[in-house]
Amino acid sequence: MGLNFQVSNSPFNEEQADLLNRLVPTLSEHQRIWLTGYLTATSSGGASQAVLQASAVLAEQTQALPQTAQVQTVPKEVTVLYGSQTGNCSQLSGKLTAKLEQLGYKVTRASMADFKPGNLKKVQHLLILTSTHGEGEPPDQAIGLYEFLHSKRAPQLPDTFYSVLALGDTSYEFFCQTGKDFDLKLEELGASKLAPRTDCDVDFDSPATEWMEQVIGALELRTSGTTVSVAAGSSVASTAAPSLEESYSRSNPFTAEVLENLNLNGRGSARETRHVELSLEGSGLHYEPGDSLGIYPQNDPKLVDDLIEALNWKPEEEVQVHKQQLPLREALTRVVEITVLTKPLLQQIAGLAPASALSELLAVGHEEELRSYISRHDLLDLVQHYELTGIAAGELVPLLRKIPPRLYSIASSPSANPEEVHITVRTVRYENEGRERSGVCSVQLAERVEAGDALPVFIQHNAGFKLPEQPDTPIIMIGPGTGVAPFRAFLGEREETGAEGKSWLFYGDQHFATDFLYQIEWQKWIKSGVLTRMDVAFSRDSEEKVYVQHRMLEHSRELYEWLQAGAYIYVCGDEKKMAHDVHAALIRILEQEGGRSADEAAAELIRLQQEKRYQRDIY
Ligand SMILES: Cc1cc2nc3c(=O)[nH]c(=O)nc-3n(C[C@H](O)[C@H](O)[C@H](O)COP(=O)(O)OP(=O)(O)OC[C@H]3O[C@@H](n4cnc5c(N)ncnc54)[C@H](O)[C@@H]3O)c2cc1C
Ligand SMILES: Cc1cc2nc3c(=O)[nH]c(=O)nc-3n(C[C@H](O)[C@H](O)[C@H](O)COP(=O)(O)O)c2cc1C
């Protein structure tokens, strides 16, 4: 290649131009491609090992191509598909898309639910961002594509280059399972990796950014037949946020004042559910019914003190943690997670205490025991059970994950409550091995937060749980317990906007007398016609336990008629039991009232899900 760098026609000084003029002609094609990818991916700073690897892999792939293929221009076109339940992958895909568009790519960005799998064969560059939900299951948005790729209809994809960003949580047994499944399946179908899959734990910001840098570097390399120029400072990490992004976010929470904090349950209830109102004044934050509020909680000070005591640490000792130098007590209260154990954490701690019996728990053959231990214990248990008292704070604390934010389905309509946000929080308290255990965030809200206090919050947008666009579309809302929260937002919004669609709410809890959350509001909406119909199931008021799914089945004919009339179905609340039972009840109704087989009814429900007529906010 006849390049000649001169001071007049390049941004280099004389010495640099001279060096380049001596170096570049000596480079092989392979070395030039490697260097292009390296410079692209690292234009904001240091290169990670993974970026270097991706660059090397691509250079090798390109070298292996026949000579003619190297000079073909590869279009700067990318398809970004996300499978998100609570909004993280959706948000990250927006960030990635904005970045790619800045670099001149034509990006097709879609939720997996909106993407026609038949079009997959036409996609040359495919970037997948997916979380995992349930116990290793795909998020609702991803089910259709996931099943298609795992079916006999899945096409071979020899011309596709792809990469997967997997979001998950190492405290789950099937960590990032859906991302792993997509990655493996695409590989089996003959697609080539643009960059290796990245699996992210709850603190996903930096690994996700690093993955974006890698894929952009790799894409630039593949499409460099058309352009290789990347503006300085254009890495994902350093670019301005997309214009639509608000200044306060998950990584930069707003400090919101608490306006009200009440217990909604009556005296004598086994439950405690807090209704918390917060001010968003001055934040510039906006939300829609169906979105969630994220809160960064603090650990229980009593648990923090017990842990410090058990380890013979000094509360004021300075520790280095997540890029901050803090007194130990503050770090344990505000920054790191002490209530959840994960296998990677136990492995690291075992490395600090090699003589401990902890290594046995981690040994091959003890998997079930390990799973059970992790699910029932916290860090204080671990320290006490395995006598880990010799470990220094400076060794252990940096191994702990950041406290992840908790999400709460927003219970207010922004039209009815401008600059405010309301949430409905069930207090988590239980006992294990003689010690009272408290949910970090819910008990903080119940015991240590009152009106006038402030909390770090952000809005988690959720496009997958939204009122129908047409205001006259009927809606069926199934939300026992705190699952009813977003329906207070839905009805508040429909009241404000004068939407005329019919609405039907299924609600349930233990007792009518003490656990009927927001009872007066539902009654008011029934009276005004905003809520057309309400069916309730109080499980402990009768001999036999009744739940919302029983009420749905009792009214299966009418429910089916609502569906025939185009109703949207919304389910919110408990993911482990309720959501499965309600799903099964819906299949029964489609089977029984629609004359379908069980398989046809299940397929119909998936179709409704893909058409966004069956939406879930489950946890
Ligand atoms: C999208 C989304 C929306 C949500 N909306 C709401 C909402 O509107 N209202 C609401 O209240 N919550 C909601 N949640 C759940 C909420 O985010 C928190 O998970 C919940 O409040 C518990 O948080 P915590 O910090 O109090 O408890 P944590 O400290 O996180 O402890 C909870 C954990 O304790 C353990 N645990 C609980 N009970 C027992 C028991 N009896 N025995 C043994 N172990 C037990 C379980 O491992 C459980 O996961 C939502 C979650 C998501 C993802
Ligand atoms: C109810 C529920 C179940 C989950 N199950 C898993 C799981 O089985 N494996 C995993 O790695 N992560 C699991 N997660 C963690 C999510 O994947 C993680 O929070 C992710 O950031 C969510 O991304 P999203 O907002 O795009 O859905 C679960 C989260 C929730 C709320």
Image (cartoon, rainbow, N blue to C red):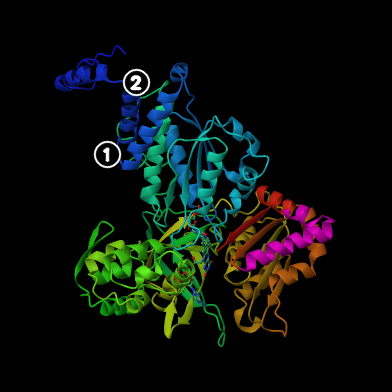
289 is higher (above) or lower (below) than 160 = below
Q: Please identify the residue farthest to the left as the structure is shown.
A: 15
- Residues at marks 2 and 1, CA–CA distance in whole angstroms: 25 Å
Using residue 7 as the reference point, say whether residue 341 is left or right of it: right
Furthest residue in direction front, as rendered = 365
State the image coordinates of residue 87 (x, y, percent, origin top left).
51, 52
Describe the element under mark 2 as helix, strand or loop: helix
Instruction: Report the residue at 67% width, 73% height from top.
Output: 523
Q: Quadrant of residue 349?
A: bottom left
Amino acid at dot 2: Glu
Highlighted range, magenta: 577-602
Q: State the image quarter where residue 443 is shown.
A: bottom left
Q: Count residues near mark 2 (Cα–Cα under 10 Å), then give few for <14, some for 14-19, many for 20+.
A: some
39 relative position to 72: left or right: left
Q: Residue at x 17, y 18 (%)?
A: 18
Q: Nearer the viewer, residue 494 or 385?
A: 385
Residue where numbered disc 1 is placed: 45
- Residue count near mark 1 (Cα–Cα under 10 Å), binned few <14, some 14–19, many ≥20: few
Q: Residue 499 carries which label?
A: none
Does label 1 point to a residue whose CB lies under 8 Å from ligand 2? Answer: no
Q: Name the residue under label 2.
A: 29
Q: How many marks?
A: 2
Res 331 quadrant in image: bottom left
